[in-house]
Image (spheres, rainbow, N blue to C red):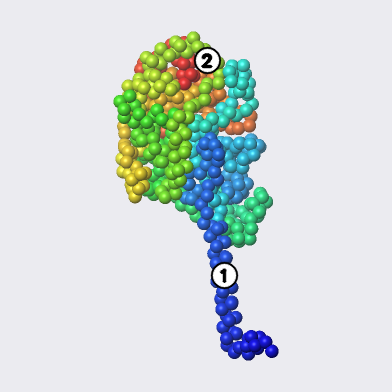
């Protein structure tokens, strides 16, 4: 008889029980290790979708806002279907958010200005810089003969760094707030819908991740709605406009009930963001005053502040990703005016520009030197609508100084209250219509008229270009497919007054005005 087999067979039963228990415990521990490892690999990665070119990074790269306000990708895809009745009723070919002026390229399922990051076990999406600083223009068939660079009518031409003159950010916010408050916004409705859209959710996503994500998204957006409740007291923005600093007050949970009435409307046009390098200094060696009211003079700090609009608040901001865009924007130039320029008229217009405009706006579209460039012009002098100026308060400037207080590399040190609007360079001015800080004047031609002769109402949101008057077609309610927003200059915050009188060129003859406009086309 084999001695060892006999030994095992005659081992006491309590020893065999202990062995079995140890084996069971070991299996449980191994199972737990495997489960924990799986969950760690599934839920811990924090990885943005990356791109090989800086242009794609600008259009679709993450700034970190998904960590804060990110919406699960399949919810983003599903919500325009679930809440279709809460979107503007526009052309039949709209792809969801396109009805709010967002831009889709090719087969991309995310529009320009929306980024994606794997975070907390989900692909989450949110906004980046491009949503406010990218747009399009179209060429009328009747103007195709005037085009000098082979562009054709019938196409939308995408321009990076351009003000997003078609994007309706107020409508975008209201859509999400209304949708999450809808009785249909629940897992029972959404999970079958995202499956039909192609999500192919596994059992963990179906019964844990997405039900939890739906609830968290709803609660998070309700909180944001509460903090941004001011928008329900404001006039409609219309496309291409934003209330930057009243939105910033939401970070500090502003008490709107106690706010002064004068600070409740700060609506302005989205700005262009080309050629940031030359904006770092003025003739006197000091940095230019930035933002419409010149409340900051540091490009990097201004950029970090702007990232708040994309959800990039401490500690969620991806500073490395933002830095790539900052470096690229230092030298990014606007596109050349695509139509024929009358050189003879432009040369005459150059002289007029030097006499009337250069000291405040720079020698040319690339040379930003000038005595008043980058300085704040007192409101009494410029006399444009003052709502945006008054909306930015000393109290907000003090609050902003506390942001990033724990990290001196990023702490805001340069925000200040001013008493006017900053004189800005005019690079790419042909693509920056409508004009004035609040977008209250549709074309350069209208801007050169006294306020009493400027349009009292006009339509915003059209990207069909007007090369004669320099701006977008603004006298049409629709183009047969899309309806445009009626802008009324009599509404608070929308005034088209100011920037008029002899020093601003509104007293020039018509021929001189057209010559000046011809020169501005070269910017």
- Total marks shown come to 2
Q: Along the line of sight, which residue is nearer the eye, 9 or 274?
A: 9
The residue at the point 64 percent across, 26 percent down is: 154
Quick one: which residue is furthest to the right in this view? 1
Residue 354 place in picture, x, y as percent: 38, 15
Residue 424 place in picture, x, y as percent: 39, 27
341, above or below 101, in the image: above
Quadrant of the rendered structure where residue 400 is?
A: top left
Whether residue 175 is visible to the viewer of this picture, yes or no, is no
101, above or below 180, in the image: above
* Residue at disc 2, secondary structure: loop
Left or right: 144, with 391 as reference point: right
305, above or below 193, in the image: above
Q: Which residue is denoted by mark 1 in the rendering?
A: 30
Left or right: 113, with 400 as reference point: right
The residue at the point 63 percent across, 21 percent down is: 141
Label at residue 341: 2
Tell me how far mark 1 sits from mark 2, CA to CA.
Answer: 75 Å
Q: Along the line of sight, which residue is nearer the eye, 384 or 403?
A: 403
- Sequence-earlier tag: 1 or 2: 1
Whether residue 145 is visible to the viewer of this picture, yes or no, is yes
The residue at the point 55 percent across, 55 percent down is: 121
Mark nearer the viewer, 1 or 2:
1
Disc 2 crowd, CA 10 A, few/some/many (<14, 14-19, 20+): some
Residue 163 place in picture, x, y as percent: 49, 31
Give the quadrant of the N terminus. bottom right
Disc 1 crowd, CA 10 A, few/some/many (<14, 14-19, 20+): few
Q: Along the line of sight, which residue is nearer the eye, 45 or 126?
A: 45
* Residue at disc 1, secondary structure: helix
Residue 193 place in picture, x, y as percent: 65, 52
Q: Along the line of sight, which residue is nearer the eye, 328 or 243?
A: 328
């Amino acid at each position: 008889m084999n001695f060892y087999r006999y030994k095992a067979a005659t081992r006491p039963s309590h020893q065999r029980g202990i062995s079995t228990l140890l084996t069971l415990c070991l299996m449980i521990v191994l199972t737990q290790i495997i489960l924990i490892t799986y969950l760690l690999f599934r839920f811990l990665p924090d990885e943005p979708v990356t791109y090989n070119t800086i242009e794609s990074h600008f259009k679709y790269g993450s700034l970190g806002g998904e960590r804060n306000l990110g919406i699960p990708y399949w919810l983003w895809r599903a919500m325009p279907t679930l809440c279709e009745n809460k979107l503007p009723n526009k052309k039949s070919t709209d792809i969801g958010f396109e009805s709010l002026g967002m831009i889709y390229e090719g087969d991309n399922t995310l529009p320009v200005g929306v980024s994606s990051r794997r975070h907390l076990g989900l692909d989450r999406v949110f906004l980046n810089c491009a949503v406010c600083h990218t747009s399009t223009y179209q060429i009328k068939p009747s103007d195709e003969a005037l085009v000098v660079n082979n562009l054709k009518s019938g196409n939308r031409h995408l321009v990076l760094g351009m003000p997003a003159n078609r994007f309706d950010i107020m409508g975008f916010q209201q859509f999400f707030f209304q949708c999450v408050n809808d009785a249909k916004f629940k897992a029972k409705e959404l999970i079958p819908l995202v499956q039909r859209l192609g999500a192919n959710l596994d059992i963990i996503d179906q019964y844990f991740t997405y039900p939890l994500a739906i609830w968290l998204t709803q609660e998070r957006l309700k909180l944001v709605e509460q903090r941004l409740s001011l928008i329900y007291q404001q006039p409609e923005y219309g496309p291409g406009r934003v209330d930057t600093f009243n939105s910033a007050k939401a970070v500090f949970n502003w008490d709107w009930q106690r706010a002064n009435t004068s600070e409740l409307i700060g609506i302005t046009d989205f700005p262009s963001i080309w050629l940031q390098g030359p904006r770092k200094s003025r003739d006197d060696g000091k940095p230019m005053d930035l933002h419409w009211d010149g409340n900051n003079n540091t490009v990097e700090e201004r950029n970090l502040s702007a990232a708040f609009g994309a959800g990039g608040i401490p500690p969620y901001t991806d500073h490395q990703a933002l830095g790539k865009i900052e470096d690229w924007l230092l030298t990014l130039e606007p596109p050349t005016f695509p139509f024929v320029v009358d050189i003879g008229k432009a040369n005459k217009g150059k002289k007029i520009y030097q006499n009337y405009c250069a000291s405040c706006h720079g020698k040319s579209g690339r040379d930003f030197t000038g005595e008043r460039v980058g300085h704040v012009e007192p409101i009494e002098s410029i006399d444009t609508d003052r709502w945006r100026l008054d909306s930015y308060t000393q109290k907000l400037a003090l609050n902003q100084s506390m942001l990033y207080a724990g990290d001196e590399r990023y702490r805001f040190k340069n925000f200040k209250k001013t008493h006017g609007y900053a004189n800005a360079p005019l690079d790419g001015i042909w693509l920056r219509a409508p004009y004035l800080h609040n977008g209250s004047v549709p074309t350069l031609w209208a801007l050169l008229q006294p306020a009493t002769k400027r349009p009292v109402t006009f339509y915003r949101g059209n990207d069909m270009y007007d090369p004669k008057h320099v701006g977008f077609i603004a006298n049409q309610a629709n183009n047969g497919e899309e309806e445009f927003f009626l802008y009324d200059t009599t509404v608070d915050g929308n005034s088209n007054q100011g920037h008029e009188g002899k020093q601003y060129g509104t007293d020039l003859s018509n021929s001189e005005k057209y010559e000046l406009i011809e020169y501005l086309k070269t910017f």
